[in-house]
Image (tube, grey):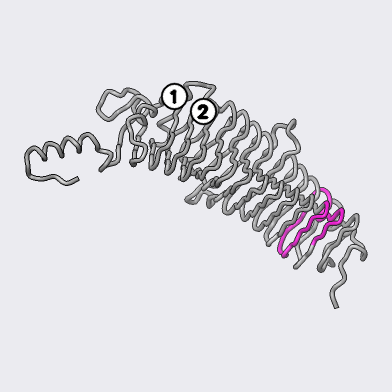
Amino acid sequence: MKCTTSGLKVCLCIVLFLMAPGLMFASSVTVDCIGVAPGTFTTITAALASMSHTDSNFIFVTCNPSENVVIGGFSNLSINAVPGTATVISADPNRRVLFINESTGVFIDGLSFIGGRGVFINNSRNVQLGDGGISNSTAIGLTSLNSTVDLFGSSPTSLFIIQNSTRSGVSAQGGTLSLDGGVTVNNNGRLGVVMSTGHLQLNGGDGGVSIPDNIISNNGASGVEVSSTAELDAGGGNSILNNGSDETLAPSFGLVAIHTSTAIWSGGTISKHNGAGVHIGETSHGEFDTVDITQNDGNGVEITDHSDAYFDGAVNASNNAGFGILVDLSSVLNSLGGNTINTNTNVGYVVNDLSIIKFAANDTVTGNGKFALECANGSLVVGDISTYKPKKCGIGFQANPLP
């Protein structure tokens, strides 16, 4: 806008400036649930109604509004609060407490959302939720559909917690969902975190030194599931613990990849589930290193139904109530060596039903309840198995070295 020294034009310039501040500056307002002072509102909904959808907007919340927030068609919107000081309580139990639709660049930090049918994010990009949480949903805690969503907790005293949902904690389809450390998903009725057809990233913490671990625990069914061509990439500190608390939903697993999906996992812990620690099935792929898979009520790891997996080293599958590792139903495991399969109640390694294990280098397989290695039903082992004792794997199950 160009202003001249003409008095009439100066006045016109000032009027236009006051009428259209969004053309030049971002809007910044406060929700204090009173709305008396200039620039303050009683609800987030009222604040949003005052804003342009295309400008950069900032809302600071200092109270606990009772409402169902709808963010539709916004770009570059921030809604912030001091963590622990602001909670949005669903005014209508039959609606989403927060619904983000067709929006880009939505950053919500320090707020908690309680009740209703949880949070729904649809066809949106670059949505970030942190340092707060979602609780007491009568459905799924957080649903993401064809969106790019990042969840985070910034410190050990400022986590993002999704808990006490009637159904699953987090359910995503399509798009990308990232848990960037400091995220806890616990005590939800069904699955902890499930992704179908999209990309799930568990970018775990460093054990709380600066970024807390992601913790997915005490959910009714499996802890983490990827299905229907989905991909999981997990690294750093991720603890999947004690899932499968609802025995009517058994078998439940710590981690499950099914229906032509992929799970790539490095670091962390998968322990104390009422089924297997890890289940790779139905033409899926797994790759693991530097992970403890221990104290599960079923097998440590099971690879089944035309699936395959790699153990890249430092996989510790020990103290499980079933087999340490089961490779079954025309599946393949390639162990690169340096893994530990100890003190499982049953056999350490089992290869069964036309399956193959290739030992590229030796693993430590000791103290298991029966055999270190058992081969059955037309299966095959490749590599040196001389150190695995006792074993039930005769010459007929062992590949002959090439001349």
Element type at mark 1 = loop
> Is the magenta region chiefly helix, strand or loop?
loop
Q: Which mark is residue 53?
A: none
376 or 262, which is in the foreground? 262
Which percent across, then down, holds residue 161?
A: 53, 37
Residue in view at x 62 percent, y 33 percent: 188
Q: Which mark is residue 96?
A: 2
Which percent across, then down, holds residue 179?
A: 54, 46
**With respect to residue 214, does 244 lie above or below?**
above
298 or 331, which is in the foreground? 331
Q: Quadrant of residue 381?
A: bottom right
User: How far apart are labels 1 and 2 at the CA level?
Assistant: 10 Å
Confirm whether the magenta stretch covers residue 338. yes
Please name the residue that numbered disc 1 is placed on: 67
**With respect to residue 18, does 318 lie above or below?**
below
Position of 351 with respect to 79 (left or right) is: right
Position of 302 with respect to 5 (left or right) is: right
Position of 110 with respect to 171 (left or right) is: left
Residues in magenta? 329-357
Q: Quadrant of residue 371?
A: bottom right
Which percent across, then down, holds residue 154?
A: 46, 45
* Amino acid type indicated by mark 1: Glu
Residue in view at x 91 percent, y 55 percent: 377
Which percent across, then down, holds residue 95?
A: 52, 25
Element type at mark 2 = loop
